[in-house]
Image (tube, coloured by chain):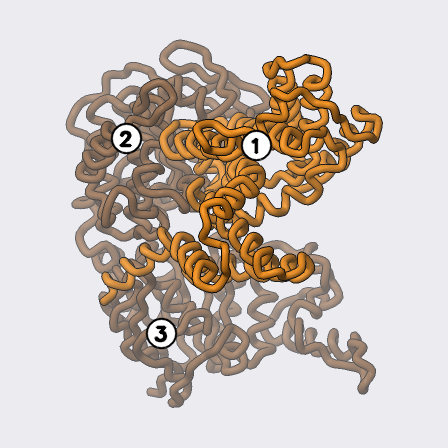
């Protein structure tokens, strides 16, 4: 059986992180090869190597029996490797045909002018090949996300792609559109084109994949034929232990004491939001990206002004005009995207950690350096933050350690309510486990925690109650027993 | 080996500017007759004190990711204002001092307000203020130098205290106060955080607008102080004084390792930057290099410093 593509023994390091270690994968021609693994497992680094964005430190890429070194995306594309990114980057004002043939438009003689008739005709041929009924003259911005995705596939085909990488292609499209996409993938297979399919969604992977490779912590855990695997086995391959071992369930009973009450909250991206948070509770916020979860948290934390609504903390109605005010009311938040909104990368671990609580660590206008150092050392030990020293620049730390610094910063304000927005995104499994057990400990000590997460296993594993958001509204509130993947997805998507 | 590299890197980052200063100083000392004499070195210090005061002030602003182009005009306006009071007030010093510093303070306040409330880019705000203030200085002084100043006022620029020229002492005071603020105080931390990542600083509870107000006000106040020193040294409030002073100040900060995109910078670095510019100007003077070439050389040093800094990262 001919292997179209082989990644042989690939290793790659970034400052402070070993991203890939001896990864080998073979992709048969005309097959769908699923690549699975937690965030941070190394999937995207591997695909960036295949796509010419990164060079491997060791190992080789062998395409059609020839060893290749790609100098960039364009080079990889010309060799037959195309990638369809999760976040599409179309040119919205151009037509479908112009997008497909961007950079290789047919030209009228030697004039340099684009031959639009030929352009559209060629586009029609490509579109027909994947059974897509979209006029080539239509502007890109008029298409749905799913259609734009298919245009990307068309673009790949027009480049004579032999391997198409699809990164979470179904994350933003409806289930009907998924069917269409899978139809197209079937057609690609029939044409001998291989698809590397990156996804977190197990049901889809089982539906479409011939082979499944699971990665964890930069290594390949295993490659199996899809029919040899079932859900449980796949999960334990991905996590390295059964999920339940990661999550500690609550040991104490909930007191029922209300910490936070949100009524009729309304903002740019959400309407009519009501919810309550109780002492010792971990409350999950599930929903698709863009469903308004982060924006609600931002409103509660004073980062965005809501248009209407009331926020009551421990029976007191509060005006959240700024994060400082929210902190004064006992709320702390660890923001999504720690590099953009969470940490000051040019500053040290210590400076970041104490930024929110600096006035507690100072005498008059002066920072009490000795006390600060003591606190920082204590926290670094408690959360097992591995950094050379408290004065190390935070930019040099691994994702997990950076996140722990951000969490320590929030906790130093001694909050009674803690909001965590995607706290485990892009960090390794060990750090994840530590963050989960930290959350449980904090909740057991009486803190109320709001967890916003796109990773359902996490929401299901640790939350006492889950609120599901759908297009800016609360679509369901699920109590502990009613939390399962299917129910959440149904409320999040329908 | 990796460890050693990290150590070396850190050494250069921490002491790179100092090293450059020592090298340039040694070269000048060996090649330029008269450079090393006490009277020449005192002259250098006296000459750099005004640029020094401005450079330290603008360092605050640059660390927050801002810029202040109105410094030179502030110097002129504050100098004129102080001189007007120094002419009328006999030998009293308080009034001209308060007038000059307050002028700078108010300028900083206006800069800060437009930057924070108006959300206009600092470059634009202070560029506009540069001409506004220059015009104001000309209006206030009727376009003529304000002279016949009191002896007490003239003594600020010309006099000394225990043998040390007063401008140098003022510069030293500014350096010490600024270093303490940036290195030891809560607001100093906030200055770095605001420049390093404004969004994150705000989300961490830092009132970033207040921090920005603070840096423009302190920068303005220092410019006012520099205006007083200058007016006193030339015994006139000169509405045309201080043209392009802001560029020398920014250059000194940048040579000293302050990052124009914010978050990084130190008072000690800026002081070294000021010293480097000062001794090079002085050395070239002593070597009879014309001011035409001096300008070219200064430009080369500014770009060179940033290139070296870039390669260190």
Q: Which residue is mark 1?
A: B219
The location of residue A362, given as percent across then percent down, is 32, 23
Q: CA distance from mark 1 to mark 2?
A: 26 Å
Note whether residue A254 is visible: yes
Q: Chain of mark 2?
A: A
Quarter of the image with the N terminus of chain A in it: bottom left
Q: Which residue is mark 2?
A: A369
Note whether residue A288 is visible: no
Instruction: Kindly state the secondary structure of the residue where label 1 is placed.
Output: helix
Dot 1 crowding, Cα within 10 Å, few <14, some 14–19, many 20+: many
For image coordinates 26% across by 42% down, the residue present is A390
For image coordinates 31% across by 66% down, the residue present is A13
Chain brown in the figure, letter? A
Nearer to us of marks 1 and 2 is 1
Tell me: residue A21, above or below residue B148.
below
Tell me: residue B193, above or below residue B251.
above
For image coordinates 46% across by 43% down, the residue present is B271
Instruction: Kindly state the secondary structure of the residue where label 3 is placed.
Output: loop
Q: Are marks 3 and 2 in contact (CB under 8 Å)?
A: no
Q: Nearer the viewer, residue A349 or A405?
A: A349
Earlier-in-chain disc, 3 versus 2: 3
Q: Are marks 1 and 3 in contact (CB under 8 Å)?
A: no
The quadrant in which residue B47 appears is: top right
Q: Which residue is mark 3?
A: A56
Chain orange in the figure, letter? B
Nearer to us of marks 3 and 2 is 2
Q: Nearer the viewer, residue B270 or A196?
A: B270
For image coordinates 26% across by 37% down, the residue present is A462
């Amino acid at each position: 059986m001919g292997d179209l593509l082989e990644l042989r023994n690939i290793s790659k390091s970034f400052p402070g992180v070993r991203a890939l270690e001896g990864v080998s994968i073979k992709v048969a021609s005309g097959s769908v090869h699923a690549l699975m693994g937690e965030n941070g497992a190394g999937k995207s680094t591997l695909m960036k190597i295949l796509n010419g964005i990164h060079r491997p430190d060791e190992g080789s890429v062998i395409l059609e029996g020839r060893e290749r070194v790609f100098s960039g995306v364009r080079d990889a594309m010309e060799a037959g490797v195309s990638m369809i990114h999760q976040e599409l980057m179309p040119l919205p004002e151009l037509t479908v045909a112009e997008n497909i043939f961007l950079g290789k438009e047919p030209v009228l003689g030697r004039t340099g002018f684009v031959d639009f008739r030929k352009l559209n005709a060629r586009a029609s041929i490509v579109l027909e090949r994947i059974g897509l009924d979209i006029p080539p003259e239509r502007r890109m911005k008029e298409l749905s996300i799913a259609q734009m995705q298919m245009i990307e596939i068309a673009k790949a085909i027009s480049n004579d792609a032999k391997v198409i990488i699809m990164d979470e292609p179904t994350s933003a499209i409806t289930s009907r559109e998924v069917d269409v996409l899978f139809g197209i993938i079937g057609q690609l297979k029939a044409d001998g084109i291989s698809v590397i399919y990156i996804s977190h969604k197990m049901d889809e992977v089982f539906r479409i994949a011939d082979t499944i490779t699971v990665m964890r912590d930069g290594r390949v855990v295993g490659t199996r034929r899809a029919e040899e695997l079932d859900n449980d086995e796949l999960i334990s391959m991905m996590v390295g232990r059964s999920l339940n071992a990661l999550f500690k369930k609550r040991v104490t009973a909930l007191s029922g004491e209300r910490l936070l009450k949100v009524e009729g909250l309304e903002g740019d991206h959400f309407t009519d939001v009501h919810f309550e948070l109780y002492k010792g509770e971990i409350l999950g916020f599930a929903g698709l990206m863009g469903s308004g979860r982060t924006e609600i948290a931002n409103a509660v934390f004073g980062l965005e002004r809501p248009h209407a609504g009331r926020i009551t903390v421990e029976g007191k109605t509060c005006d959240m005009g700024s994060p400082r005010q929210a902190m004064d009311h006992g709320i702390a938040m660890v923001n999504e995207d720690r590099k953009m909104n969470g940490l000051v990368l040019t500053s040290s671990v210590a400076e970041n950690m104490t930024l929110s609580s600096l006035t507690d660590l100072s005498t008059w206008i002066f920072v009490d350096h000795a006390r600060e150092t003591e606190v920082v050392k204590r926290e670094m030990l408690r959360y097992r933050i591995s950094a050379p020293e408290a004065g190390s620049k935070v930019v040099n730390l691994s994702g997990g350690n950076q996140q722990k610094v951000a969490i320590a910063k929030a906790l130093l304000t001694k909050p009674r309510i803690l909001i965590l927005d995607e706290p485990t995104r892009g960090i390794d499994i060990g750090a994840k486990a530590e963050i989960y057990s930290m959350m449980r400990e904090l909740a057991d000590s009486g803190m109320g925690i709001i967890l916003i997460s796109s990773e359902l296993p996490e929401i299901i594993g640790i939350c006492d109650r889950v609120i599901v958001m759908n297009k800016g509204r609360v679509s369901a509130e699920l109590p502990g027993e009613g939390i399962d993947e299917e129910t959440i997805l149904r409320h999040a998507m329908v | 080996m990796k460890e050693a590299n990290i150590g070396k890197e850190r050494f250069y980052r921490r002491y790179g500017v100092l090293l450059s200063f020592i090298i340039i100083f040694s070269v000048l000392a060996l090649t330029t007759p008269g450079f090393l004499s006490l009277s020449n070195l005192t002259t250098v210090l006296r000459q750099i004190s005004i640029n020094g005061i401005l450079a330290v002030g603008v360092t605050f602003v640059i660390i927050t990711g801002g810029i202040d182009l109105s410094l030179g005009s502030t110097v002129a306006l504050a100098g004129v204002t102080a001189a007007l009071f120094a002419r009328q007030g006999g030998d009293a010093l308080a009034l001209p001092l308060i007038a000059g510093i307050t002028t700078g303070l108010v300028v900083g306040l206006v800069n800060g307000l437009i930057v924070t409330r108006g959300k206009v880019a600092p470059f634009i705000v202070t560029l506009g203020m540069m001409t506004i203030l220059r015009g104001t200085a000309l209006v206030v002084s009727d376009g003529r130098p304000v002279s016949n100043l009191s002896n007490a006022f003239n003594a600020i620029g010309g006099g000394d205290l225990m043998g040390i020229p007063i401008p140098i002492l003022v510069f030293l005071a500014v350096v010490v106060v600024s270093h303490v603020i940036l290195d030891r105080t809560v607001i100093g931390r906030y200055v770095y955080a605001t420049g390093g990542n404004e969004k994150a600083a705000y989300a961490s509870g830092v009132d970033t607008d207040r921090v920005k107000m603070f840096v423009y006000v302190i920068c303005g106040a220092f410019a006012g102080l520099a205006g007083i020193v200058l007016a006193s040294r030339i015994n006139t409030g000169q509405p045309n004084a201080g043209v392009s002073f802001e560029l020398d100040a920014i250059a000194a900060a940048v040579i000293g390792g302050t990052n124009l995109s914010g978050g990084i910078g130190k008072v000690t670095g800026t002081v070294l930057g000021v010293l480097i510019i000062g001794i090079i100007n002085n050395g070239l003077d002593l070597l009879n290099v014309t001011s035409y070439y001096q300008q070219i050389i200064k430009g080369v040093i500014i770009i060179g410093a940033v290139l070296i800094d870039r390669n260190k990262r």
